[in-house]
Structures are given as C-alpha cells and as structure tokens.
Image: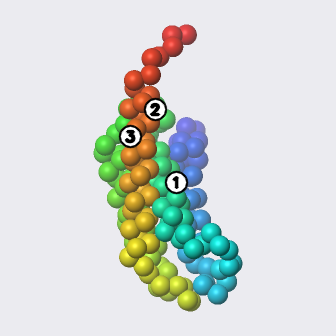
Amino acid sequence: MAAPRTFIRYRFPAVLWAMLIFAGSSIPSKAFPVIKIFEFDKFIHLAVFFVFGFLVYRSLARTDDGVAFSWSRATLATLVVVVYGILDEFHQSFVPGRTPDVWDATADTLGGIVAVIVLFAYYRWKATKPRMET
C-alpha cells in the first residue's frame, strides 16, 4: 500500500497545483477581479511557477530522502515547468479575453529556474550543516 501513499504525498501536490494553474488560466478576462496586485502579473507568474517548480522537483523523488540535490531531477522539473508554462499560454488563447504572452511564459520559466536555484542552495547549505548524532 505504499504506492498510493507515495502518490498522495509526493506527486499529488504537483498535480493539484497544475490543476489550480489551469483553473486560474481558464477565467475569462471580464470575470477577473480588479485588484491592484494584478498589476504585478509577471511577479505572480514567477511566484506561482516557483511553487510549481518546487512541487515538481519533489514529485520526481522516489522518497523524500533529502540527502542530495539531483541535477537530473532539477533539469526534468525545469523542463516540466517550461512546457507547462508554454501550454498554459497556448490554453489562454482559447479563453475569452485572454491572450498568450511570451513574457508570461518567460516569467513562468524564471519561476521554475529560481525554484531549482533555491533548492540547490538549500541542499548545499544542508550538506554543510553539522549533523547531530542521536
């Protein structure tokens, strides 16, 4: 019974986040609330896809061993974020009042890259921390 638990713990958060991104991109422009924070939409894209990049990286682990940073996982996670960001922009071309934007896709990509950089820094910091013996 470990497989369903592994899916729910490691993969489901990334799938759920992707579904939330899709749902948010499906909102027609006229239905969007007028909130001052939406003036910073590139930052919002970066933040949303930063979280997505982190979740995708985590979802690619067999377990949360937390031992070492994996460049192959980081590369695959970044690729997933980039492709999903591009597909998300394409999807928006079918939503009334929304248009695909190369700068949004760029911000999405940067979010994924920043997530990988933060994860790399975290694992590097964690490796230099002295371990406490129990």
Q: Nearer the viewer, mark 3 or mark 2?
A: 3
Residue at disc 3, secondary structure? helix
Q: Label 1 neighbourhood size at 10 Å, few (<14), some (14-19), many (20+)?
A: some
Separation of residues labelled 3 and 1 (CA atoms): 15 Å
Residue at disc 1, secondary structure? helix
* Mark identifier at residue 29: none
Looking at the image, is 66 positioned above or below residue 110? above
Q: Earlier in the sequence, mark 3 or mark 1?
A: 1
Circle 3: residue type = Phe
- What residue is at 64 percent from the left and 87 percent from the top? 30
Question: Which image quadrant is residue 20 in?
Answer: bottom right
Q: Label 3 neighbourhood size at 10 Å, few (<14), some (14-19), many (20+)?
A: some
Colouring: rainbow
Residue located beneath label 2 in the image: 66
Residue 98 placement (x, y as % from top left)? 52, 85
Circle 2: residue type = Gly
Q: Earlier in the sequence, mark 2 or mark 1?
A: 1
Report the residue that reaches farthest toward the bottom. 96
Residue 6 placement (x, y as % from top left)? 54, 42
Question: Does residue 52 appear in the picture of this structure?
Answer: no
Looking at the image, is 61 positioned above or below residue 18? above
Residue located beneath label 1 in the image: 51
Circle 1: residue type = Val
In the rendered view of the protein, which quadrant contains the N terminus?
A: top right
